[in-house]
Each structure stands twice: as structure tokens, then as C-alpha cells.
Image (spheres, grey):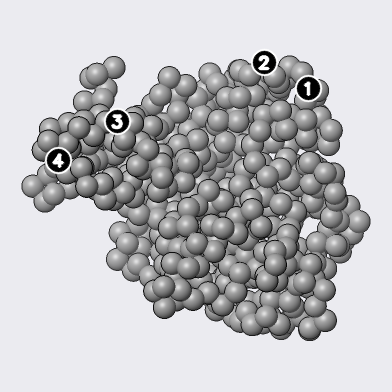
């Protein structure tokens, strides 16, 4: 059967992302749009909208044209949305880059996306320069590196804002033009550029309205990274569109996080499970007045039901809210509404409007299942991505001929219409909300001269966090240690991708076709516990 949303369909929103988000900025006027959680500096909705126009003019004057790809490599700052929406207003596609990227990883994304422009901050300039050097050596030089907070020899945000050039008049086709190109490992494999059009993102915001729409003036704490589609959608696009105030923090530090809630009287927390865990258990939380918090929404990775209940008790909330989606879905399909007084325990929410869901059997028959029966989730709706950039075959493997996106997640719909996630078909590891592709780590491991073969799976540590574990085959005569392996990988990948455990094996189990049999490694791991 096909599950349908309980809510009336919503119209397609054919607007550029910057207009969909900032279209009502003048109406919200002097109300705070962005608040620096550390310094208290405030930018109003009207000021933000004006800054976006100036940045667009500055970028266009620098040479940015429609169809260019601009990489945004920055931690959360109040300048981030100015750069992001300014770039889309100038006609560029923005590829958002993890703030933990190494020079090699950054160069890889710049190379794959075809980015000609890079916007960063001074602290990240060495990494940015290293990536640029790698590309230049390949004959793919960047046009320019813009450093938002300023650096010698580089254009800054202040320079862009000070331009006297006219605001560009760029025609945008919302249904075809790609607004954002975040990178995701999808259901399997290496990271791929996910083509999200202006229409898919704008329409998804309209879909989410039925279940989650912050009130004008509501204060939302933004510590999840804006480069991640979850942070971009839930902490910039939706709050700014609704006239809320986004309190911005550059990274998660529990004391800083709690202090920002207390000082700015934050009402809404949008988090990932590791933050919920800290709020539930860390004694430091008791030192702060968090009574302003009205709800907490957790997504990006599975959240244990008991942990959710403990966190809710600690914050004096009736329950925590959850949501479900993926980068390829712009990103939201299910949400528990803040106005829902009795959600199903452990559920990730009800389906947003104009969305269809199928739950299909895992036995290879692809039979449609009914309520209470777990299977792979297939989604169809206007929020489905345009495809993977430059990868038509991988797009076809995920989106079938009828437009159903095969998520790789296993779940079921209960008799009240709430979705529950119970497992994953896909091989992707979710370490504290970050995506880690086993194939990427395996490629790094195989670059070591003393490693003959390797495989990586996700294992659960003592705190309930899924972590990458490597099964390594040494070359004959090697005395390679586990510490040697972890240090080797750590030197080449972002911190969240590090291998956290190593086991040496005689051989990696593989199918006759050469595919790693991860299920055998998982069974081996389970038997050892």
C-alpha cells in the first residue's frame, strides 16, 4: 500500500531559495534574525536581506555568474547566511563543505563539484590554500578565495558589502536550477553531490509548515553545522523564513551551549543525539537556567527512547520531538510537531504534506507492506532531489522509473500514522550525526604499504554511539599495530571519520564478485560481545 500524509497537499513553491527564505524580511523589519551567541551581536531581518543583496552585487562584480559553483567552507557564523544567500542571489550553486575537511577532502569536493570560487574564514585559510594548491597543480585553478573575516590578499565580506556595483538581475528556473550541492554518501559508496533545486528546497519548507513553523521572534539555538542539510534547513531556512531569531554558535561546547540558552532565553533546541545525551546526563547542565526551552527537536541519527525520555525530564519537557529525512529529500519527510501532545513513543513523526511513502519487503520481492510491518522506506514527492551530480547511473540506482527514492532505511508506520525507524539497509555509518562512508575509509586504509586488505563497519561503543571499526589484513611479515592504523587514518581524514577500533584478520569476507560481505563482519562482531 501507499501511505499518504494526513495533511492537505501544499502547492509547489516556484521561488529561488533566497526569495523563499527572505521574502518577508522587510515585514519582520528590526526584529533580530541572527544573534551571535558569544558576542551578542545582532543582525535584523531587514539588515540581513540588505546584506544579501550587497553580497550578491559584490560577488557578481568579482565575476560570479549564473551556473558557477561556489564552495562555502566555514563554521557557523552570522556571516554564513549572508554569503550563502548572496551567492544564490548572484546565480551561483553553493556546495557546502564540512568545516572539518582536510585539504585533500576539500580539494576532492571542489574538483568533483567543479567549484570555481571558495568562500572561507581566516582560521580555515591554510586548509583552503592547501586544497587550492592541489587543484592548481592539476591545471584546475580556483578563480578566487574570499575570506569572510579578512586576510591579506583576499577579498572579505566587508569588501563585498561595500561594493557600489548594481545588484545582478539573474533569471532563475526554480525547477531546474540547482541551489545547493551538499555532499552525501547516499545509501552507499563515496560522497556524491546532491542536486537540490530551488523548487525542491522551497517547496519542502512549505511542506514542513504543516507540522513545524517557528513563531515570529522565537529564539532558536543553532549549533548544528550549517554545512549539513539538517542545519541549513532547520536552523537557517525555516526559522529565517518564519521571522524567528537564530542564536548562532560556532561549535558544540556544552557549557557554552547552556550559557547561550540561559543568556538569550532560547525557546527552541534543534539537535542531534549526542547533544541530547549530554543534556540528559552531564552534571554541568544543572548549573544553568534552561527553563526558557519550550521544545527540543532531535534528528540526523537514531535516538534511543529511554535517552529521549531522560533528556525530556531533565529539561522539564513532556517529551522530545524527532524528525526524519535525508539530504536527497531536501531534507524532510516526517516531523513530530511541537503542538503534538501525544506522539507515539520513539516515533520520528508524521508525514509532511504532498508526500507518499511505501514500505517494501526486504526479502527481494519488494512487496508493499502495511501498518506495523517493517521494510525499506521509499519516498516520492516534490522534495526528492534532482539527482547526484555527474552520476546518472548512481541516481538511477536510488530513484526508480516511477520517481520513488529508495532510502535504504528500514522502518514501519504504526496504526496512528507515525513513522518508526528500526534499522538501515545501507552501509553508511552515522557517527554522532555525521555521515561516514566505509568505502572512503577502506580506500585510505589500502593506501598503507603494510595493509593487504581492509573492511570497515559501524559498531556501537559503550555510550551507544556508532563508530567506524576496521578489519585489517596485514601484509606478510608486517608488525603493524592497531595504534599505527588509527594514526595513519587520522592523518588523512576529518576527525569524525577516524577509525575508532581495529581488528586484525586473516582475510576479509567477500562474495564471488568481490563485494565485501559486511553482514558477516557484523555477525562476527555481535558474537564477540
Query: What residue sits 23% from the left and 19% below the top?
Result: 527
Image quarter in which the C terminus is found: top left
Residue located beneath label 1 in the image: 288
* Tag 4 near tag 2, CB within 8 Å: no
**Spatial CA span between label 3 and label 4:** 14 Å
Query: What residue sits 14% from the left and 40% below the top?
Result: 475
Residue located beneath label 4 in the image: 475
Above or below residue 370? Residue 80 is: below
Residue 127 falls left or right of residue 31 = left
Residue located beneath label 2 in the image: 283
Kind of element beneath mark 2: helix
What is the count of numbered marks? 4
**Spatial CA span between label 2 and label 3:** 34 Å
Which numbered marker is on residue 482? 3
Q: Nearer the viewer, residue 380 or 481?
A: 481
Residue 130 % position (x, y): 50, 62
Amino acid at each position: 500500500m501507499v501511505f499518504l500524509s494526513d495533511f492537505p497537499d501544499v502547492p509547489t513553491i516556484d521561488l529561488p531559495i533566497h526569495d523563499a527564505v527572505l521574502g518577508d524580511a522587510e515585514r519582520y523589519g528590526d526584529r533580530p534574525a541572527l544573534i551571535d551567541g558569544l558576542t551578542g551581536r545582532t543582525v535584523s531581518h531587514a539588515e540581513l536581506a540588505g546584506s544579501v543583496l550587497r553580497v550578491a552585487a559584490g560577488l557578481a562584480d568579482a565575476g560570479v555568474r549564473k551556473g558557477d559553483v561556489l564552495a562555502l567552507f566555514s563554521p557557523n557564523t552570522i556571516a554564513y547566511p549572508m554569503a550563502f544567500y548572496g551567492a544564490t542571489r548572484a546565480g551561483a550553486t553553493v556546495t557546502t563543505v564540512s568545516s572539518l575537511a582536510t585539504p585533500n577532502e576539500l580539494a576532492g569536493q571542489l574538483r568533483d563539484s567543479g567549484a570555481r570560487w571558495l568562500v572561507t574564514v581566516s582560521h580555515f585559510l591554510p586548509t583552503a590554500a592547501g586544497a587550492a594548491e592541489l587543484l592548481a597543480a592539476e591545471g584546475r585553478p580556483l578563480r578566487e578565495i574570499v575570506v569572510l573575516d579578512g586576510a591579506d590578499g583576499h577579498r572579505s565580506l566587508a569588501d563585498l558589502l561595500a561594493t557600489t556595483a548594481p545588484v545582478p538581475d539573474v533569471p532563475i528556473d526554480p525547477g531546474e536550477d540547482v541551489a545547493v550541492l551538499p555532499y552525501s554518501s547516499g545509501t552507499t559508496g563515496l560522497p556524491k553531490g546532491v542536486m537540490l533545486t530551488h523548487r525542491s528546497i522551497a517547496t519542502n519548507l512549505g511542506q514542513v509548515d504543516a507540522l513545524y513553523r517557528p513563531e515570529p521572534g522565537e529564539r532558536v539555538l543553532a549549533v548544528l553545522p550549517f554545512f549539513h542539510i539538517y542545519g541549513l534547513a532547520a536552523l537557517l531556512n525555516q526559522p529565517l523564513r518564519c521571522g524567528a531569531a537564530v542564536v548562532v554558535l560556532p561549535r558544540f561546547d556544552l557549557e557554552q551551549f547552556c550559557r547561550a540558552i540561559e543568556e538569550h532565553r532560547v525557546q527552541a533546541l534543534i539537535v542531534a543525539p549526542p547533544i541530547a545525551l549530554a543534556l540528559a546526563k552531564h552534571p554541568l547542565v544543572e548549573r544553568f537556567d534552561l527553563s526558557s526551552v519550550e521544545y527540543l527537536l532531535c534528528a540526523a541519527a537514531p535516538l534511543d527512547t529511554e535517552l529521549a525520555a531522560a533528556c525530556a525530564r531533565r529539561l522539564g519537557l513532556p517529551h522530545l520531538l524527532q524528525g526524519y529525512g535525508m539530504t536527497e529529500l531536501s531534507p524532510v519527510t516526517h516531523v513530530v510537531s511541537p503542538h503534538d501532545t501525544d506522539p507515539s513513543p520513539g516515533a520520528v513523526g508524521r508525514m509532511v504534506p504532498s508526500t507518499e511513502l511505501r514500505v517494501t519487503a526486504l526479502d527481494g520481492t519488494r512487496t508493499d507492506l502495511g501498518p506495523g510491518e517493517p521494510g525499506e522506506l521509499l519516498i516520492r514527492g516534490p522534495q526528492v532531489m534532482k539527482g547526484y551530480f555527474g552520476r546518472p547511473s548512481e541516481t538511477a540506482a536510488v530513484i526508480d522509473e516511477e520517481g520513488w527514492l529508495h532510502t535504504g532505511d528500514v522502518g514501519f508506520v504504526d496504526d496512528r500514522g507515525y513513522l518508526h525507524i528500526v534499522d538501515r539497509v545501507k552501509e553508511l555509518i552515522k557517527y554522532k550525526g555525521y555521515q561516514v562512508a566505509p568505502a572512503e575509509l577502506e580506500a585510505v586504509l589500502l593506501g598503507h604499504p603494510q595493509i593487504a586488505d581492509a573492511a570497515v563497519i559501524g559498531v556501537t561503543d559503550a555510550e551507544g554511539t556508532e563508530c567506524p571499526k576496521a578489519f585489517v589484513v596485514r601484509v606478510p611479515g608486517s608488525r603493524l599495530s592497531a595504534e599505527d592504523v588509527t594514526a595513519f587514518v587520522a592523518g588523512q581524514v576529518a576527525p569524525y571519520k577516524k577509525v575508532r577500533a581495529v581488528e586484525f584478520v586473516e582475510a576479509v569476507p567477500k562474495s564471488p564478485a568481490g563485494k565485501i560481505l559486511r553482514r558477516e563482519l557484523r555477525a562476527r562482531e555481535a558474537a564477540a560481545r
